[in-house]
Amino acid sequence: MTWHRFEGSAEQWDHLVERLGATTPFQLSAWALFRQSFGWDSLRLVTSNNTAAVQMLSKSIGPVRIAWAPGAPLGDVTSDQFGELAGTTKQLLGGIVTYLRVADHHPHDLSRVDALRKAGWSRCSALLGSSETLVRSLDPTTAALQNSYSSNWSRNLRRGIQREITANVWDSPEPELVARMHRDVEAVKEPFRAEWRGDSTSIQRLIEVFGEQLLMVKAQDRTGSVLSLRAAVIIGTSAFDFLAATSSEGRKLYASNVALDVLLTALAVRGVTRYDFGGVDRVNNKGVFDFKHGAGGTDFAYTGEFETAVPHLAKPVVSKLMALRLSA
């Protein structure tokens, strides 16, 4: 059997995840710990030579075992290994039916897509996230960073500063304020945004489990009122855009530009060289796409979301049910 259960500690798992090139937070032990409060258990698998790994979140719904692996698999995976992954998962989770879904954040590669399809996987019809994002490099010098913004984005940053908007790293975020700001912008949220961002208890738990890996910035007006916030999760020398909210007043004052500029600067100072803007939808959420693109983001495509089931005939039915229940 190619895959086996990972028996090491959470810290050892995170070291492996970083070594295998994770650039998003969903394969970190902290994410599994956070999702436990939503009823998800974790199952971690590695190949015999530790060249590939998968952290799955699992749930049981009657006789069906659901395994959801955002950001996985990591490393080099052959078609045979993709095929064996579902069987190993069923063996370890039990159940009459096992449904397995991955959101592969590996750079889009036709050979990897072919390997998945040859192993009996198919693209998901109802996506939970975006297979497209924007990525930019970071430079530790402020001048180099700001020179990489578009002219319009830079102009809006200057407008924010001229309106006395300031930003700084938020060392002790207030969970209720963070949640309330997300609830206030719910009407214009990105379609793949998870609802837990508007819950203060969930935000508190997120802050606790990620600790220093979560870097948050707040932008405020001259009275100290918080108008915008932005946070990223750091994975080695990469960071992933994770939280973002701006009030209606903050949008008028370009507070989001000031917040993001300070966040990117703080990340660069900490040695981060790659920033993933956390997914984009250039058609249904063009305003957000333009904002991230103007901040220096360039197109990047993930391999995307694929699914399979054991037995295979159960996949179409379970897939439709899961699209209604799963979230990132």
Image (cartoon, grey):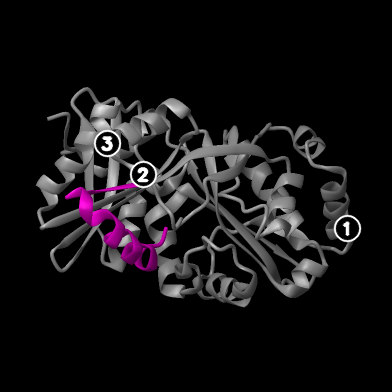
* Inter-mark Cα distance, 3 to 1: 46 Å
The amino acid type, in three-letter code, at marker 3 is: Gln
Q: Which residue is mark 1?
A: 159
Q: Quadrant of residue 77?
A: top left
In the rendered structure, the answer to whether residue 128 lies left or right of residue 257 reads left
Between 203 and 102, the one lying in front of the other is 102
Percent of width and height locating residue 75:
36, 29
Q: Is residue 205 above or below residue 242?
A: below
Magenta portion: prevailing SS class = helix
Q: Which mark is first along the chain, 2 or 3?
A: 3
Q: Which residue is mark 3?
A: 12
In the rendered structure, the answer to whether residue 151 lies left or right of residue 149 reads right
CB under 8 Å between discs 3 and 1: no
Q: Which residues are magenta?
A: 307-328
In the rendered structure, the answer to whether residue 168 lies left or right of residue 97 reads right
Residue 167 visible, this orientation: no
Q: Which residue is mark 2?
A: 122
- Label 1: element kind: helix
The N terminus is located in which quarter?
A: top left
Is 311 covered by the magenta stretch?
yes
